Amino acid sequence: MNKLKTPYYLIDEAAILKNMKKIEHIYLETDVRFVLALKCFSVWQVFDLMKKYMNGTTSSSLFEAKLGYEKFGKDTQIFSTAYSDRDIAELKKIADKVIFNSVAQFEKYREVLRSDSAKKGISLGIRINPHISNSPFDLADPARKYSRLGVSSIKELTPLVGRVDGAMFHYNCENESFESFSKSLDFISDKYGKFLQKVRWVSLGGGISWSKDGYPIKKFCDKLKAFGEKFCVGVYLEPGEAAIAGAGELVCSVLDIVKNVKKTAIVDASVEPHMLDMLIYRQNAKINEPAGQHEYIIGGRSCLAGDVFGTYKLKRELSVGSVVRFADAAGYTMVKKNWFNGLQMPSIVIKRLNGKVEVVREYDYKDFINS
């Protein structure tokens, strides 16, 4: 590990396996299917491990769907806010479930997806906006005011009864509360019960922190099982971060330490190109360091004044060359990384179950030019 050049993303298969075992337990207790949300995590070099426990992938675009089909296999699902003719022409050959955001798009493409030239058995679904959500961020709130995500009127759903196979409700974001999840599911059951009785499957989306330590898994299983049995439907969950929680780090090195009242350690990575969500949602990156009395602002090496990972009190003093590890860096990082400032893009490194460390992707000047 000490020979690896920073910066790099480190993915630990042992940590992924811990989450996969929870998936296995929930599946055996409830028969709920899990599909990996590729918008969060698309490192296909660990898919051989994950597909032993998960039922497929869910995508937000044609390219993600193709990645899921080619590298993961099994159940290839896709939801898009809007499809183009070109999307549908390719999706009809590879998709198992296509979920529409509007009645108009369902009507436009349903015959194409069920034609003789399409993959046999494609199942069509509709996304529903239940007008409730659990999101600490307006930016990520699918039920925000004037939301474009999902059919918002029960009246619009009426003509689809008996014509769509499934329904999707994606209304959670970083929801750590089982009580909130349970209350919301009861609301959906009551409000959309008549519609749900006429479909074959229901996706409850992602954003549920069931893999977090201390989450009441038994209550979660009981709730999911009761919901599926009540409506005689197959139930899907679409975990992104929950599937890879605690499995990734962004490892970087201190290049310099400057002082303007407070000490700032400048590392060879950057927030905007390498952990963009921290900047978007104005959060500090988590750090894998023992706490102590030595206070540092840790900043990135870009020209952006606000390129700051956070302020931390560490047990050790930092110096040039010190290695710093930011935690929970697997989700919404590598899928969003960019070439801002032309900074060196972190390599992708995997620590396999057998302890072997494998560099699966490196980037150089040619990648920057070609981008």
Image (cartoon, rainbow, N blue to C red):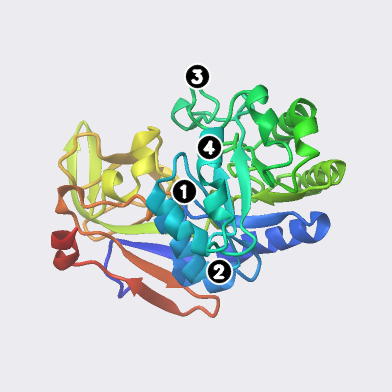
Residue at 44%, 29% in the rendered image: 139
Q: Earlier in the sequence, mark 3 or mark 4?
A: 4
- The image quadrant that residue 368 belongs to is bottom left
Q: Is residue 153 left or right of residue 7?
A: right
Which comes before the other along the chain, label 1 or label 3? 1
Residue 91 pos. (x, y %): 48, 58
Name the amino acid, label 2.
Gly
For discs 4 and 1, the disc positioned in front in the rendered view: 4
Instruction: Look at label 4 and name its amino acid.
Output: Asn
Residue drawn at x 63%, y 37% is 169
Q: Secondary structure beneath disc 1?
A: loop
User: Is residue 129 toward the left or the right of residue 309 in the image?
Assistant: right
Q: Secondary structure at mark 2?
A: loop
**Label of residue 92 in the image:** none
Q: Is residue 203 visible?
A: no
Which residue position holds label 2?
73
Quadrant in the rendering for residue 20? bottom right
Q: Earlier along the polypeptide chain: callout 2 or callout 4?
A: 2
Q: Which comes before the other along the chain, label 2 or label 3?
A: 2
Query: How many C-alpha atoms fall within 10 Å of the one at disc 1: few (<14), some, or many (≥20)?
Result: some
Report how far apart the C-alphas of labels 4 and 1 lie in the structure. 11 Å
Locate the C terminus by quadrant: bottom left
Label 3 sits on residue? 145
Q: In x, y percent, where is residue 223? A: 81, 42
350 or 225, nearer to the observer? 225
Whole-angstrom CA distance, mark 1 to mark 3, is 22 Å
